[in-house]
Image (spheres, rainbow, N blue to C red):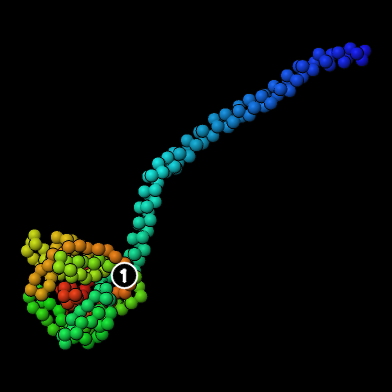
């Protein structure tokens, strides 16, 4: 009886070995089926997410450009955070009546200064009557106007500036942000073309007021008022 059992086991042994060899293959096939089923189940969810979040379908280059635009916008907002209504840059120079040159940040109430008449044809004796803003440590966005002969002046966004409009052949008052290179700045007995306009961030802004409402800054006629 025992010999018969042994004989049967020997006959079954090759079948068992084949089953053992086939068992890992069967497991792999089952795993593949499960993975395919999971992928099929997840595919509708992925499509739904793409519809809800179309940004994920954008190309990497488009995403990079979008981030750069957002960074530039945040930078402009930071620069404009402390922009006053109408001010001068403190390092720009004015002429005192006694011939002395003084920076705007050094001006005091009562200082006698030169300004230019509205038509730009004559000097006018003037006086500083008040300093509306005196902020030496605050960073501010300025419009810097450079002329073709090397003069320049820096003003905040809403600061008024007399310009000559060649199209209308008139002198007008415009806020700094609206002045273009087509305009001319007013100097004594002449009108000078603007070569370039630069936006830059500088530290220190001041608002001196004068009796006439004008001030000669770096030999350029500037209003002391702003466009509110």
Q: Secondary structure at mark 1?
A: strand
Is 47 above or below relative to 77? above
Picture coordinates of residue 125 (x, y %)?
13, 84
Quarter that holds the N terminus: top right
- Between 200 and 41, the residue placed more toward the observer is 200
Q: Residue shown at 20%/70% (left/top)? A: 152
Whether residue 60 is visible to the viewer of this picture, yes or no, is yes
Q: Residue at x 25, y 79 (%)?
A: 104
**Picture coordinates of residue 78 (x, y %)?**
36, 63
In which image quadrant can residue 175 be found? bottom left
- Up the image or down, 101 lies above or below 43; here it is below
Is 11 on the left or on the right of 87, as rendered?
right
Position of residue 133 measured from the top left corner of the image (x, y, whole percent): 29, 77
Instruction: Please tell me how many numbered marks the rendered image carries.
Output: 1
Q: Residue at x 59, y 31 (%)?
A: 35
Quadrant of residue 228 within the rendered picture: bottom left
Location of residue 86 by image quarter: bottom left
Residue identifier under label 1: 202
Q: Is residue 173 visible?
A: no
Within 10 Å of the Cα at label 1, are there few (<14), some (14-19), or many (20+) other Cα atoms? some
Q: 154 left or right of 52? A: left
Place of residue 206 in the rendered image (x, y in percent of width and height, measured from the top left): 28, 76
Residue drawn at (12%, 67%) of the image? 192
């Amino acid at each position: 009886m025992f010999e018969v059992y042994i004989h049967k086991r020997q006959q079954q042994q090759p079948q068992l070995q084949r089953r053992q060899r086939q068992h890992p293959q069967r497991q792999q096939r089952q795993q593949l089926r499960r993975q395919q089923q999971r992928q099929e189940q997840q595919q509708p969810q992925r499509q739904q997410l793409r519809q809800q979040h179309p940004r994920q379908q954008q190309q990497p280059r488009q995403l990079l450009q979008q981030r750069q635009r957002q960074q530039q916008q945040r930078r402009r907002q930071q620069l404009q955070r402390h922009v006053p209504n109408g001010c001068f840059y403190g390092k720009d120079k004015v002429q005192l009546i006694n011939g002395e040159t003084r920076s705007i940040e050094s001006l005091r109430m009562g200082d006698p200064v030169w300004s230019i008449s509205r038509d730009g044809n004559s000097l006018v004796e003037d006086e500083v009557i008040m300093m509306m803003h005196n902020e030496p440590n605050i960073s501010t966005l300025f419009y810097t106007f450079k002329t073709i002969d090397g003069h320049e002046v820096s003003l905040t966004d809403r600061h008024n500036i007399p310009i000559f409009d060649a199209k209308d052949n008139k002198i007008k008052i415009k806020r700094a942000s609206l002045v273009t290179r087509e305009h001319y700045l007013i100097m004594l007995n002449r009108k000078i073309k603007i070569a370039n306009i630069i936006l830059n961030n500088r530290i220190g802004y001041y608002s001196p007021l004068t009796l006439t409402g004008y001030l000669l800054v770096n030999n350029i006629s500037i209003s002391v008022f702003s466009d509110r």
